Amino acid sequence: MSDETGRILAVDPGERRVGLAISDPLGITAQGLPTFDKKKGDVFAHLRALAARYDVALVVVGRPLSLSGRESEASRRAAEFARAIGDALSVPVESWDERLSSAEAQRVLAGTRAEKGAVDRVAAVLILQGYLDARRGRAPEP
C-alpha cells in the first residue's frame, strides 16, 4: 500500500451472501473473513463494524463484468452496492473486475467439503489478492 494507513476490505456482493476478505497491514496478502448472510442482519452495519475493527482505509468491491468486458445487470447492481458502501462507511470504494472469480473459487474448493459461503469467501480473497498484486505491480490490471 502506498502512503495510506489501514487495511483494504474486499467485498464480493451476491444475491444471498457477501464474501469478505481483508488485507494484511502491509497490503501484501489477502485473508478470508466469514461470509455474511444477508438474511441474518444489516450488511452495512456489519461492514461498519469490520471497518472499525480492522482500521479499513479502502473497500474494493467485485464488479462482475461480462466475459467481453461489458456492463451486465449484475455489474450495475454491484456498482450501486459499492456506492451505498461508500455512503455507509465514509471510506473510499473502488470497483475491481471479478470476472470468473466465483468459478475460480469453485475450482479451488473442488473435492473439499466446504461449508455454505466458502465459495463467496474464496472469491473475495481472489478479488483482493488480484487487486493487491496489481497495486504492487505484480499483476496486470484486468
Image (cartoon, rainbow, N blue to C red):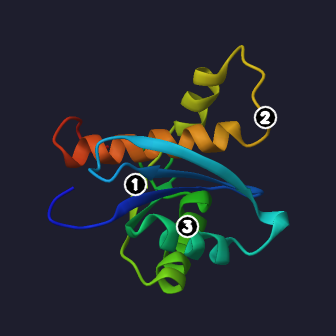
Could you tell me residue 124's position as x and y percent? 53, 46
Return the disc, 1 or 3, that comes first in the chain's sequence: 3
| Residue at the top extreme of this rendering | 111
Callout 1, which amino acid? Trp
Q: Quadrant location of the N terminus?
A: bottom left
* Residue with the mark numbered 2: 115
* Residue with the mark numbered 1: 96
Left or right side of 110 for 56: left
Left or right side of 124 for 45: right
In the rendering, which numbered label is found on residue 50? 3
Q: Are marks 2 and 3 in contact (CB under 8 Å)?
A: no
Whole-Å distance between the Cαs marked 2 and 3? Answer: 22 Å
| Residue positioned 66% across, 49% down in the render | 34
Toward which corner of the image does residue 17 lie, by quadrant? Answer: bottom right
Mark 2 or 3: in front is: 3
| Residue positioned 64% across, 27% down in the render | 106
Q: What crowding class fits label 3: few (fewer than 14 Cα within 10 Å), some (14-19), or many (20 or more)?
A: some
Q: Dot 1 lies on which element?
A: strand
Observer able to see residue 8: yes
Observer able to see residue 67: no
Residue 94, above or below 96: below
